[in-house]
Amino acid sequence: MEASAERLRSARGSRRSVFRGERRLGAAMLAPSLIVIALVAAYPIIYAVWLSLNEYSVITPGLSRFVGLDNYSEALSSSAFWEAMKTTLLFTVISVGLELVIGLGMAMIMHRAFRGRALLRAVVLVPWAILTVVTAITWRTIFEPELGFVNTVLTSLGLPGGDVVWLGEEGYALAAMILADVWKTAPFMALLLLAGLQGIPEDVYDAAKVDGATAWQRFRSITLPLLAPAIAVALIFRTLDALRIFDLPYVLTKGANGTETLSLLAQKELVVNRNTGLGSALAVLTFITVMTVSFLYIRFIGGNIRALAEEEQ
Amino acid sequence: MTAQRRERLGQAALWLAVAAIVVFCLFPFYWLINTSLKTGADLSSANLLPPSPTLDNYTSIFKDSAFTMALRNSAIVAGSVTVVSLVIGSFAGYALARLHLPFKFLILAILLSISTFPPIAIAAPIFEIWTDIGLYNTYPGLILPSLAFGLPLTVYILASFFRDIPRELEEAALIDGATRFQAFRKIVVPLGAPGVVTAGLLVFIFAWNEFLFAITLTSTPDRRPVPAAIAFFTGSTQFEIPLGTISAASVVVTVPLIVLVLIFQRRIVAGLTAGAVKG
C-alpha cells in the first residue's frame, strides 16, 4: 500500500518533469520563429504607428516632431484616400465574387471530369504559378491598344470597342485589373473548393436522385451547405489578399485611371513623395482596414472554421 | 429525349466546359509567349502566330546585365528565405504539432493573423529602419521581411504534416533512449519529408513572387530581384514599354515555376489545402 503510493508519487513526479522538459524543449523550438516574427512583423507595425504620429522634415533628414493624429486627419480628409478606399473595396468585392462563382463552376467541372482530371489540375495551376508581375505584363500585352489581342479581335469582327484604350480609361482600367486578378486566382479558388467537393460522399447525391431531386435542388440543398466551410475559408483567404493588392495595379497601370489601391497610395506617398508621416498613416489605415474585414469575417462566418478546427483536434 | 441521348449530351457539354477551362487558363500565357517571339516590326501586329518567329528577344535579355543580375538576386533571396523558413519553421511546426504546450492555440492564431497583414504596413516602417541601419538595398534587408510571411506559412504546413506522422514511431525511439530532439531530427523530419518539400516549394514560390519589398527596399540593379526588375523595365509612362524583351523576360522567369508546379502538383495542392483548411 505504502509502496504503491510511493510509486505513484514518483511516477507522477517524473511525469511532471517530463512535461516540464517538454515545455522547455517546446519553448526552445518555438523561440527562433517567434523572435524573427516579433522583429520583422510585430515591431515594424508598432514602429509604423509611431512614425505616423510624427512629421518629418524633407529638408533636414532626421528632423521630426510629434504631431499627434495630424497625419490621420490629413489622410482622412484627402480625396485620394477615399478614392483608393473605394477602388480597393470595389476591386475586392467584384473580383472575389467572380472568383467564387467561376472557381465553384470550375471545381464542379473538374470534379465530374474523371478522365484527365490530373492533367486538368495541372493546367489550372499554371495561372497560379505565374508571377503576379508577369500576370500584369501578360494582360498588358492583351489590352495593348495597337497590337493587343482584345482590340484586334474587336476591330476584325467589326464590333464596337476596337478603338478603346482599355487601360487608359477610368472604369475599363479597373475592369481589366479585375479580369487579370480573376484569371490568376479563380483556379486557386477552384482547387480549394475541389478539395471540399471531394469530401462530400457520393451516396448522399444518389439518395437525393432516388428521391427525385433535380440537379438544381441537389446543388442548393446538398452541395452548397456541405461546401460552406471550404467556401468560407477560400473567401477569407482571397478577400484578405485582394484588399492588400499592390503588384497588379503597379505594373498594369501604375495606379492611373481609377486603379490606385490603398497599398499603392501608401507606398507612393512613402517612397516616391518621401512623406514618411503621411505614408505611415496610410499604411496603418490599410492595416486597420484589412484587420477590420478579417475580424468581421471571423465574427460572422468564423464559427464554421472554429468548428472545423475543433473537429480536427 | 431518351436517357441515353441526354447522357451523351451531358458528356459533350462537360468536355466543352473542360475545353473552356483549358483555354481560359492557358491562352493569356500563350499570348505572352507569342509576343516574346515576335520581331520588332511584327510587334505591332496581333497575329495568333508570330509571322517570323525569332529568339532575338531572348538573346538580348541574356546580354542585359540587369536581367541576369536580377535572376541571381532572386535566386539568393528566395533561396535564403526558403532555407531559413524551413529550418526554424520545422522546429516550431514540431513543437506545435507534438509537444504539450500552453497557449498553443494563441500562437497558431498569432501566426495566422500575421500572414494576413498587408505587406505595406511592414514595408513602410522597415523602409525607414533599413535606411537608418544600413540594410536598405542589401540581401539581408530583402530576406528578413519576407520571413514575416514565409515563416507562418511554413509552420502551418509543417505542423499539419507532422501531426499525421504516427506517434508510435517516435515513442519507440524515445524508449530506445533517444532524446526528444533526436526523435524529431531522426524520425519526424525524414518521415515528414513530403511536408518539408511542399512547404519549401510554396515558400520559394511566394518569395520568388514577392514584389512590394522588392521594389520598396532596393535601389540598384545589383540587388533588385526579378519582379522588381521586370516592373522597372516597363518605363516611366504607361504605354512606353519594350514589349518584346519584357515578354521574353517574363517567360524566362515563369517557365521554371511552371515546371516545378507541374512536377509537384499533387504536393502543392495538398499543401495549399492543408494551409487553408486545417488552420
Image (spheres, rainbow, N blue to C red):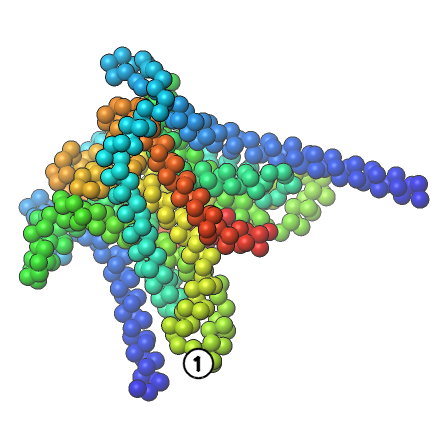
How far across and how far down the image is residue A155, in percent? 7, 57
| Pick the front one: B253 or A12 | A12
Tell which residue pokes out farthest to the bottom in this image.
Answer: B2
Q: Residue at x 47, y 32 (%)?
A: A37
Q: Is residue B72 visible?
A: no
How far across and how far down the image is residue A281, in percent? 33, 28
Relative to residue A116, is residue B223 depicted above or below?
above
Label 1: how many Cα within 10 Å (few below 14, some 14–19, many 20+): few
How far across and how far down the image is residue B202, in percent? 41, 45
Q: Residue at x 34, y 19 (%)?
A: A67
Q: Residue at x 57, y 42 (%)?
A: B105
Residue tagged 1: A212
| Pick the front one: B221 or B142 | B142
Three-letter code for the amino acid on which mark 1 is drawn: Gly
Callout 1: helix, strand or loop?
loop
- Asked which quadrant contains residue B189, the reply is top right
